[in-house]
């Protein structure tokens, strides 16, 4: 499991003063990117050196409660399943007091032509060490 924190700023909120719903997907993306970095992987390096990318194939979000200006969010990311060319991750976004959002995302490994390819063994091994 990987965990990051993020503070809510004015730019994250809507006219009602709560976090705009689409921003939870941005927060989750940042957390997934940081998760990759935590095991020594960056999207730009994967593209340049191995000709592959991780792209979102499916995403589901259950928004339970809204965050507000100045809230400190905790975003947890976990790999639930890894197969040949994809992985399923679960993410939660919460404050200290409340679970705000649950996200399930299926990420596919693709080449430059956006064709699915197997996740390289060395990358799978890095994730297993993280877990």
Image: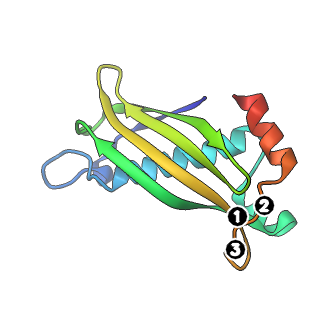
Is 112 placed above or below 83 here? below
- Lower position in the chain sequence, tag 3 or tag 1: 1
| Disc number for residue 53 | 1
Sort mark 3 into few (<14), some (14-19) or many (20+) by Cα contacts within 10 Å.
few
Which quadrant of the figure has residue 14? bottom left
Sort mark 2 into few (<14), some (14-19) or many (20+) by Cα contacts within 10 Å.
some
User: In x, y percent, where is residue 27?
Assistant: 44, 47
- CA–CA distance in space, label 2 to label 1: 6 Å
Instruction: Identify the coloring.
Output: rainbow
Q: Is residue 87 left or right of residue 74?
A: right
Q: Which residue is mark 3?
A: 115
| Disc number for residue 131 | none
Is 106 placed above or below 98 here? below
Sort mark 1 into few (<14), some (14-19) or many (20+) by Cα contacts within 10 Å.
many
Which quadrant of the figure has residue 62? top left
SS for callout 1: strand
Q: Looking at this view, is 14 or 93 the one in front? A: 93
Is 98 placed above or below 56 here? above
Q: Looking at this view, is 23 or 8 the one in front? A: 23
Residue drawn where x is 46% and y is 45% of the image = 104
Q: Which residue is mark 2?
A: 46
- Lower position in the chain sequence, tag 2 or tag 1: 2
- CA–CA distance in space, label 2 to label 3: 15 Å
């Amino acid at each position: 499991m990987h965990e990051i924190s993020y503070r809510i700023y004015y730019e994250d909120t809507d006219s009602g003063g709560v976090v705009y719903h689409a921003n939870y997907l941005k927060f989750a993306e940042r957390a997934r990117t940081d998760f990759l970095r935590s095991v020594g992987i960056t999207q730009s390096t994967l593209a340049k050196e191995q000709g592959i990318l991780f792209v979102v194939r499916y995403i589901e979000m259950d928004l339970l409660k809204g965050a507000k200006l100045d809230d400190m969010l905790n975003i947890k990311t976990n790999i639930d399943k890894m197969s040949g060319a994809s992985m399923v991750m679960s993410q939660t976004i919460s404050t200290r007091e409340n679970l705000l959002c649950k996200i399930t995302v299926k990420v596919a490994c693709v080449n430059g032509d956006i064709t699915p390819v197997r996740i390289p063994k060395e990358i799978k091994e890095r994730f297993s060490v993280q877990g």
